[in-house]
Image (cartoon, grey):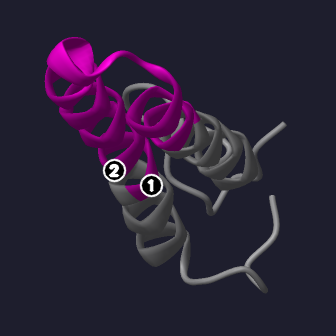
Amino acid sequence: MRGVDQPAQVGRRPSNPAFLLLLGVVWVVCAVVAGIGLHTSWRLIPTIAFAGVGLYFLRGAAITLIRRGGPEAGD
């Protein structure tokens, strides 16, 4: 519950950066597995797509940490 002197929270709260980091790492690992394990003709497109999604989640985790003020600024 917020105090009298605290402003109201407008909009959604940012996602947990640890969760976003985990999702990003999982997608990057999927990109590595696709790059190594798929047949030569199908290797490039899924690898780029998986890596792009992973980088998107890693970017989201970094932005959430910056907006919160770093890892020491708890909930």
Compute the Cα span from label 1 to label 2: 5 Å
Left or right of 70, for residue 59: left
Residue 18 x %, y %: 74, 52
Q: Check disc 2 and give the amino acid type.
A: Leu
Residue drawn where x is 33% and y is 50% of the image: 55
Of 59 and 35, the residue lying toward us: 35
In this rendering, the answer to whether 18 lies above or below 26 is below
Of 42 and 55, the residue lying toward us: 42
Of 32 and 75, the residue lying toward us: 32
Mark number displayed over residue 75: none
* Secondary structure found at label 1: helix
Q: Which residue lies furthest to the front in this view?
A: 40
Left or right of 14, for residue 5: right
> For mark 2, what is the residue?
55
Left or right of 12, for residue 30: right
39 in the magenta segment = yes
Left or right of 60, for residue 7: right
Quadrant containing the N terminus is top right
Residue 33 x %, y %: 56, 33
User: Picture quarter containing residue 16?
Assistant: top right
Mark number displayed over residue 58: 1
Q: Check disc 1 and give the amino acid type.
A: Leu
Please state the extent of the stretch shown in magenta in the rendering: 30-58
* Secondary structure found at label 2: helix
Neighbour class for label 2 at 10 Å: few (<14), some, many (≥20)? some
Residue 52 x %, y %: 24, 39
Residue 62 x %, y %: 44, 67
Q: Are marks 1 and 2 in contact (CB under 8 Å)?
A: yes
Of 17 and 41, the residue lying toward us: 41
In this rendering, the answer to whether 15 lies above or below 75 is above
